């Protein structure tokens, strides 16, 4: 019997509260964003192969100006490297579990994505997570990889490529929906993963996404803070404690429907990040998006490391209309 193709879809994500403390033993709340997703297709073949995406891995450009524009907006790397990295990590993870993969059982991977590049919406990890889903199903080993361990595999594949990130994005993309995450130091060091709890999506108010035409390098934003953390910088430690507290308090605000408290926490999350990273690192375009939302009284913060913001209008419809009007005129 010939095995059929396997397809996996993984959504983009929004970091709602607590980020970026996931890399620093903090707490976060994230949610899946159904508007955008990555798709990976695994086709059984006689060998292992990867299909370049015609846009993101393309090697053909109209002219040099087109080349420069594409590289400036999307960077030099496409999705093929992500697929290769998770295949390597998957094989090594199977070997550690003494799972022998049949040498004659091979595949070709291809991908598609409509997640805006470098916009802080976790487009790279969506591709990796979707590919992992395909591999687990193809080899029939899903039961050997519990859900709470899968985000670590996705993160390991990205770390293999030098991508700086935390577990938050991978957790919500594995579990889906809305997830509260506690990366308590003792629990992480003892088990290698955090405590993850799915929340009812009905607790969410209406949120708005604004993302920039000119993307940012989401990995570069973390660099200096990570070094300061490793040196024991007191300001970084205090900020991470604040982020974690925001997520913890934000969960209560969501579950009790306290719109004003949620708005205040979102603003506090961004203000703490701004003090920690500084305006030069956050970038002019990102700051303009935040200021646009705040100019009409909306709460706003980054969805990730920059390139997109999530806005919340606690006053309702009229405030939302003014926010959309301001955003569309940027």
Image: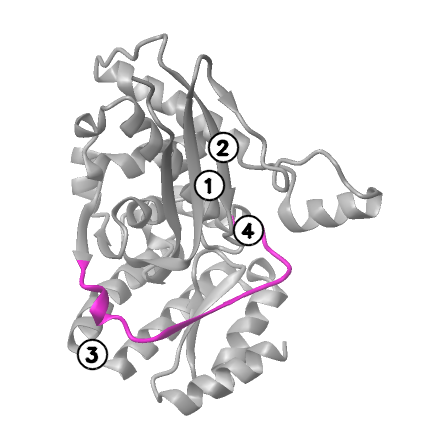
- Cα separation between marks 3 and 1: 34 Å
Tag 2 residue: 110
Magenta segment boundaries in residue numbering: 199-218
Q: Residue at x 56, y 77 (%)?
A: 327
Tag 1 residue: 164
Q: Residue furthest front?
A: 1
- Cα separation between marks 2 and 1: 24 Å
**Mark 3 or mark 1: which comes first in sequence?**
1
- Cα separation between marks 4 and 3: 32 Å
**Mark 4 or mark 3: which comes first in sequence?**
4
Tag 3 residue: 257
Q: In the image, is residue 146 above or below residue 184?
A: above
Question: Is 214 colored magenta in this rendering?
Answer: yes
Q: Where does the image place residue 110, in percent across and percent down from the top left?
A: 49, 32
Q: In the image, is residue 305 above or below residue 296?
A: above
Tag 4 residue: 118
- Cα separation between marks 2 and 3: 42 Å
Quadrant (top left, top right, bottom left, bottom right) of the C terminus: bottom right
């Amino acid at each position: 019997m010939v095995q059929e193709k396997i397809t996996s879809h993984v959504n983009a994500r929004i970091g709602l509260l607590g980020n970026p403390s996931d890399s620093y033993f903090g707490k976060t709340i994230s949610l899946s964003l159904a508007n955008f997703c990555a798709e990976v297709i695994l086709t059984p073949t006689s060998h292992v192969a990867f299909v370049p995406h015609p846009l993101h891995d393309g090697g053909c450009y109209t002219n040099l100006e087109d080349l420069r524009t594409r590289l400036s907006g999307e960077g030099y790397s496409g999705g093929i490297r992500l697929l290769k990295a998770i295949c390597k990590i998957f094989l090594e993870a199977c070997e550690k579990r003494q799972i022998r993969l049949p040498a004659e059982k091979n595949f070709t991977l291809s991908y598609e994505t409509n997640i805006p590049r470098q916009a802080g919406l976790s487009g790279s990890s969506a591709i990796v997570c979707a590919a992992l889903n395909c591999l687990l199903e193809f080899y029939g080993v899903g039961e050997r990889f519990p859900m709470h361990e899968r985000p670590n595999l996705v993160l390991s594949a990205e770390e293999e490529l030098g991508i700086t990130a935390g577990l938050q994005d991978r957790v919500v993309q594995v579990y889906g929906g809305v997830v509260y995450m506690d990366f308590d130091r003792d629990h992480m060091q003892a088990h290698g993963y955090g405590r993850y709890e799915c929340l009812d999506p009905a607790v969410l108010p209406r949120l708005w996404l604004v993302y920039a035409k000119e993307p940012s390098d989401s990995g570069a934003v973390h660099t200096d803070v990570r070094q300061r953390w490793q040196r024991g910088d007191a300001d970084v430690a205090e900020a991470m404690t604040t982020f974690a507290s925001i997520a913890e308090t934000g969960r209560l605000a969501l579950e009790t429907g306290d719109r004003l408290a949620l708005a205040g926490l979102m603003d506090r999350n961004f203000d703490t990040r701004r003090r920690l990273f500084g305006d030069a690192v956050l970038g002019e375009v990102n700051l303009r998006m935040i200021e646009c939302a705040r100019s009409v009284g909306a709460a706003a913060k980054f969805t990730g490391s920059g390139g997109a913001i999530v806005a919340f209008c606690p006053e309702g419809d009229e405030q939302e209309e003014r926010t959309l009007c301001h955003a569309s005129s940027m």
